[in-house]
Image (cartoon, rainbow, N blue to C red):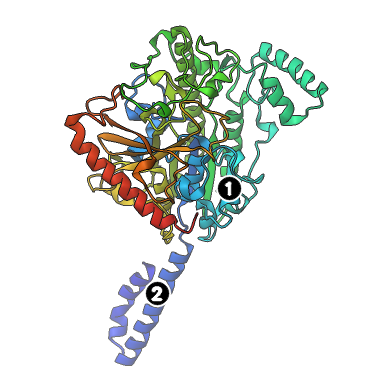
Amino acid sequence: MWAHLIYQNNIIIFMKKNNKSFFTFSIFLLISVCFINKTYSQNKRKPNILFIAVDDLKPELGCFGNKLIKTPNIDKLASKGSLFKQNYCQQAVCGPTRASIMTGMRPDYTRVWDLKTKMRDMNPDILSLPQYLISQGYTTQGIGKIYDVRCVDKELDKPSWSVPYYKVDKSYYSVQTGLPALNYYQNPETKKLAEIYLKEATEKGLKGEDAITEALKKLKPSNECADVPDNAYTDGANALEACDILKKLSKSTDPFFFAVGFSKPHLPFVSPKKYWDLYNRNDMPLAVYQQPAKNSVDIAYHNSGELRAYTDIISPIPISEDSVGITLSVDKQKEMIHGYYAAVSYTDAQIGLLLKTLDSLGLADNTIIVLWGDHGWHLGDHNLWCKHTDFEQATHTPLIIHAPWIPHSVINSPTEFVDIFPTLCDLVNAKIPSTLDGKSLTGVMKNPTLPFKEYAVSQYPRSGPTAETERLGYASAKYMGYSIRTKQYRYTMWLKDKFRTYDSFDESKIYGTELYDYKKDPNETVNVVNEKKYAAISKQLKSKMILYFNNQEEKLKNKK
């Protein structure tokens, strides 16, 4: 700009001189302006990315229409950013869905379908989002749960991070309480019992996490309300350390990708008393429909095995191949939902601390913020608790993306987690890798009326009818349920004989199918796949499913 002003102030003088002098000066000014513009372009910093993950967070948030839950910080972020109302995970369990988010690839490509397969054992050369951003000039750092630790190396996927992954520093925990017992608990009575059981474990020759695992078999409450500060628990300590990391990053000249993962509301539902006090337990909303859907497929369900592992859970229904979910008393259901809501509000407060720090450091105007919950969670619907299904409550997930230069928007088109990787590439002007399974969301962020995707795809493996046999061992599961979710319908096809989408589809492999109409039946009470009035819809969606299989087979033919 100043060069332009110099030109304006001096043009009259040079007009009085000969043409040669005027021409020479004009060339000088043109070169100067080009140099200034180039220097400005080089010095302009690419947008930072703050990548916030929340474990087991379903769309029970104020911004999604829940008027009871208290989530002011997430709601504020949603009011500024793009809120994806119909976003879905690729598989409703931590390891696989996080592998898909971080690589932009579906589970049949990553081959992570369980909680023990390591992503790079199956795909040594797979490209992760932060790994790609390193090549684009970014520093990449992380703290808390981003990948599932069981599905990556000891460095939490070493190729993803330009700085070694942070482990929470013990100094960030409350001095008043000390570290949580068995990684979770601060209740004094629980801590006393934990000492006893840990001593017994060490006397058996067990050490470290092995001793903790043994003690948890005897003492593992599903929730805890303790009058303690936020940093008595790991998420609070992580939030404090994350804020200090942000302060260091603010002094760097390089753009950053900073991933911060929060564990709550994952079980156990532990959080400070002040968050429990936000709610009246009598107000806790019980699931409207607590039975299996009429005409549904048996392997669509599980026996809530994850919840059964908690030592305060008492159920009259034993674990068996025929068990569907777990039957809890009304009081216990309300207690569990109360604990979930309190844990969500606790995490919301930690996110608020992080966002406030970002703003105070002057980083907010040049930082893209992505907030996601890795999958949904059953809170008693279909008599189910936890995740591990293809139903709506397990696959529907919150997603918010705030790019400061894009106005607030609400997107109602189906979207998926595999869309995050290409979207962030697009937002930072990086070339989108051609191999990714997702699509950039930037178009619908700017104009929510644009058509985007016709449906989102989720899948879930099952070892046998309803049962979660060896809950970590889904990799060899002989059934896989593939689900496509349009704006109104969910069509699910369960296939047997270890079918995956890199195989050729064969009608004989179909074990069962489901169709739910969410406009007429939001609680999934009836599988209408074989009803006459839905025949055309069933046929149409089946055709789309088979086309999806065929396209995936072609794409994955070299992955067998």
Q: In this rendering, would 520 be left or right of 99? A: left
Does residue 265 lie above or below 105 as drawn?
Answer: above
Amino acid type at mark 2: Cys
Q: Nearer the viewer, mark 1 or mark 2?
A: 1
Residue with the mark numbered 2: 34
Out of 40 and 466, give the one closest to the viewer: 466
Q: Is residue 556 left or right of residue 249?
A: left
Residue drawn at x 51%, y 9% is 316
Badge 1, how many Cα within 10 Å: few under 14, some, many 20+? many
Taking 52 as reference, is 553 above or below it?
Answer: below
Residue visible at 59% across and 14% down?
227
Residue farthest left in this picture = 533
Q: Quick one: 215 or 162, which is closer to the camera?
A: 215
What's under tag 1, amino acid-wise? Answer: Gln
Q: Residue 76: x, y in percent?
A: 38, 33
Q: Residue 349: image x %, image y %?
A: 49, 28
Using the image, tell me which numbered label, if any, was put on residue 141.
1
Residue 192, image x and y in percent? 72, 13
Residue 461, percent from left and from top: 47, 36
Residue 254 seen in this snapshot:
no
Residue 474 visible somewhere in the drawing: yes
- Labelled disc at residue 156: none
Cα–Cα gap, marks 1 and 2? 36 Å
Q: Residues within 10 Å of mark 2 (few under 14, many from 20)?
A: few
Secondary structure of residue under mark 2: helix
Comes first in the chain, label 1 or label 2: 2
